[in-house]
Image (tube, rainbow, N blue to C red):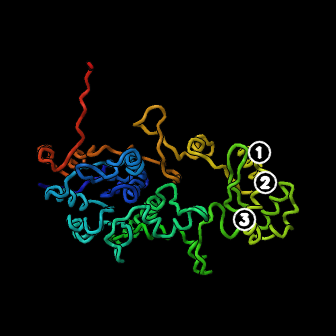
């Protein structure tokens, strides 16, 4: 079976047009990093087992993961346990710019697709691996998911109320941050390759990303020796700061802890006396008397609607925000003007998806299409690699690769 180097089939436009990424990722962290490249115009080939990325098999949230983290990719369904399947994968990585994987430790090496194997085939490749706990410590062989990283990095210890149990953040924060950090690292490696011609090996772990997200907390801990604790809403050393206050129809968050902002807030609500009240005259005092402070502010803002509070405070230089549910976020004029929600061509009646959170002047914000069905591009990827129709048919018949089975359409359907 003869292969030629894979030719990029990504969009002709986009900042990363001409870059080819081979993605062996599952779930969120690695696939979401690769999806960023697809959004920017790269040709991203998602290598999936014959039964698909595991996220395809875990229900509604899994389906959402697939749609969110695999936009614009081409899906190749292949049995990597079969020597012919391994050969397909090896030939694909031989022509790739980037290889991304988050398989269990050792799995890629057993398949002959570890970093040394790939660099022997393609020294210019940027090879990026996501692990749960890094590859050097005693937990290097452990499987890792977002929730384990939240737990073992300290995030859960500072999330929740003082008298409650530790809580996870209400989204897969570490997975998402890992994808963003990995994208940054890959782009840096590609930039270096342009100058030196050298490929790279990148390793990132969920644990390290989760710790990095807490850099300010760690600096405070190193400085004081005091461990941060769960305090619910509100920052632990200044007030009012990130405090949640009830309104007539909802809640706002409020921060006014600098000397100037605190004095301005007191004047605004007609309580200049609070500036000189010993309970509220300094940040440490306001932190110690936070419950009394919030009761006073709640009495004022509880008479107003959320929007009235935000308009009033923001108009006077005070940082405030409305606490919104997803429906309200979608209806926000600021969000609408940002362009973060994009129209999804596969959905009718105004279906949308979340696009990239930045705009490069002169470049389209997103050039990718929807997430692929399992094996949707098996034939086109193999064809681009140089296989003949006869060879592809043989691989399909042997069960080495797979493509979606067309559902017949009947004009005449009877019960």
Mark 3 lies on residue = 239
Dot 3, crowdedness within 10 Å: few (<14), some or many (≥20)?
many
Mark 1 lies on residue = 304
Q: Are marks 3 and 1 in contact (CB under 8 Å)?
A: no
- Judge whether residue 113 can be spotted in this image: yes
Kindly indicate the quadrant of the structure image that contains residue 217: bottom right
Query: Residue, x 84% and y 63% (percent of image)?
Result: 274
Kindly indicate the quadrant of the structure image that contains residue 262: bottom right
Apparent side of residue 323 relative to residue 3 in the rendered image (left or right) = right
Residue 339 in the image, given as x and y percentages of width and height: 54, 45
Image quadrant holding the C terminus, namely: top left
Residue 164 in the image, given as x and y percentages of width and height: 57, 62
Secondary structure state at the residue bearing disc 2: loop
Residue 316's disc number: 2
Quick check: 404 above or below 197? above
Front position among marks 1 and 2: 1
Image quadrant holding the N terminus, namely: bottom left
Secondary structure state at the residue bearing disc 1: loop
Dot 1, crowdedness within 10 Å: few (<14), some or many (≥20)?
some
Total of numbered circles in the picture? Answer: 3
* Cα–Cα gap, marks 1 and 2: 16 Å
Query: Residue, x 60% and y 62% (percent of image)?
Result: 161
Dot 2, crowdedness within 10 Å: few (<14), some or many (≥20)?
few
Comes first in the chain, label 3 or label 1: 3
Taking depth in this image into account, of 296 and 100 the one nearest to the observer is 296
Taking depth in this image into account, of 120 and 305 the one nearest to the observer is 305
Secondary structure state at the residue bearing disc 3: loop
Kindly indicate the quadrant of the structure image that contains residue 296: bottom right
- Judge whether residue 11 can be spotted in this image: no
Comes first in the chain, label 2 or label 3: 3
């Amino acid at each position: 079976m003869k292969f030629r180097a894979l030719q990029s089939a990504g969009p002709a436009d986009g900042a990363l047009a001409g870059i080819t990424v081979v993605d062996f990722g599952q779930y969120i962290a690695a696939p979401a990093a690769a999806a960023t490249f697809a959004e920017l115009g790269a040709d991203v080939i998602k290598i999936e087992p014959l039964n698909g990325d595991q996220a395809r098999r875990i229900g509604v949230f899994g389906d959402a993961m697939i749609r969110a983290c695999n936009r614009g990719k081409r899906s190749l369904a292949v049995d990597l346990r079969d020597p012919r399947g391994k050969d397909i994968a090896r030939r694909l990585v031989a022509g790739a710019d980037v290889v991304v994987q988050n398989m269990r430790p050792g799995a890629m090496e057993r398949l002959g697709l570890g970093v040394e194997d790939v660099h022997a085939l393609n020294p210019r490749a940027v090879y990026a691996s996501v692990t749960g706990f890094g590859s050097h410590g005693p937990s290097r062989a452990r499987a890792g998911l977002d929730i384990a990283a939240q737990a073992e990095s300290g995030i859960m210890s500072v999330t929740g109320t003082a008298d409650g149990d530790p809580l996870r953040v209400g989204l897969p924060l570490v997975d998402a941050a890992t994808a963003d950090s990995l994208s940054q690292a890959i782009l840096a490696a590609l930039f270096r390759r342009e100058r030196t011609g050298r490929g790279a090996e990148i390793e990132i772990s969920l644990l390290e990303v989760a710790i990095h997200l807490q850099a300010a907390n760690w600096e405070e801990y190193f400085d004081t020796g005091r461990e941060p604790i769960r305090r619910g809403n509100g920052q632990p050393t200044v007030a009012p700061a990130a405090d949640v206050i009830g309104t007539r129809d909802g809640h706002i968050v409020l921060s006014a802890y600098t000397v100037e902002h605190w004095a301005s807030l007191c004047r605004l609500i007609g309580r200049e006396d609070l500036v000189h009240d010993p309970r509220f005259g300094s940040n440490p005092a306001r932190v110690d008397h936070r419950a009394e402070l919030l009761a006073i502010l709640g009495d004022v803002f509880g008479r107003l609607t959320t929007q009235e509070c935000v308009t009033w405070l923001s108009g006077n230089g005070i940082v405030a925000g409305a606490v919104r549910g997803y429906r309200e976020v979608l209806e926000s004029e600021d969000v609408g003007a940002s362009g973060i929600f994009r129209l999804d061509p596969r959905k009718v009646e105004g279906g949308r998806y979340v696009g990239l959170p930045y705009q490069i002047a002169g470049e389209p914000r997103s050039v990718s299409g929807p997430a692929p069905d399992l094996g949707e591009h098996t034939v086109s990827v193999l064809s681009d690699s140089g296989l003949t129709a006869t060879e592809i048919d043989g691989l399909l018949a042997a069960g080495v690769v797979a493509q979606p089975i067309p559902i017949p359409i009947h004009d005449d359907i009877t019960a």
